[in-house]
């Protein structure tokens, strides 16, 4: 990680630029207010955090299962690996 990296500034600039382009073409709002950021500690399991993020659409009531959400996926973990983590959380 770069010492001069500024996630808040990057996200703010990205959201502003993409929202302006979206608004020009659709006249609708693109982003909701705020976002969450989290620094993973060395002892945290990355897959557990990824599973929690991918389960967000389920918690929001958008889908019944995380893998039904159109934009679900991971470059690092398979859907069965993530499903296993979520199943262990329920037991």
Image: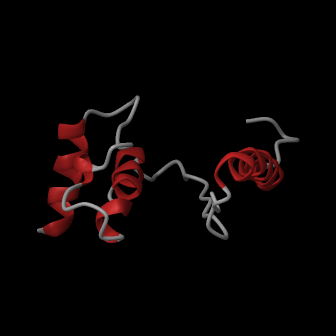
Rendering quarter of residue 5: top right
Q: Quadrant of the N terminus?
A: top right
Q: Quadrant of residue 81?
A: top left
Give the total of numbered labels. Answer: 0
From the viewer's perspective, is residue 68 above or below residue 62? above
* Extreme residue in the right direction: 4
x and y, in percent, of residue 44 in the image = 44, 53
Q: Quadrant of the C terminus?
A: bottom left
Q: Residue at x 52, y 48 (%)?
A: 42
- Which image quadrant is residue 77 in? top left
Looking at the image, residue 45 sits to the left or right of residue 66; the answer is right
Which residue lies at the image location 22% right of the left edge and 57% below the top edge? 86
Q: Which residue is found at the position 75% from the left and 48% from the top?
A: 24
Q: Is residue 74 left or right of residue 90?
A: right
Q: Position of residue 12 (x, y in %)?
A: 79, 55
Q: Position of residue 21 (x, y in %)?
A: 75, 44
Q: Furthest-left residue in view?
A: 91
């Amino acid at each position: 990680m770069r010492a001069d990296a500024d996630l808040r500034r990057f996200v703010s600039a990205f959201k502003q630029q993409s929202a302006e382009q979206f608004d020009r073409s659709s006249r609708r709002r693109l982003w909701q207010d705020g976002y969450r950021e989290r620094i993973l500690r060395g002892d945290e399991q990355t897959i557990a955090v990824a599973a929690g993020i991918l389960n967000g659409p389920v918690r929001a009531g958008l889908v019944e299962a995380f893998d039904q959400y159109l934009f679900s996926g991971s470059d690092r973990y398979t859907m069965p690996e993530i499903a296993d983590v979520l199943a262990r959380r329920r037991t």
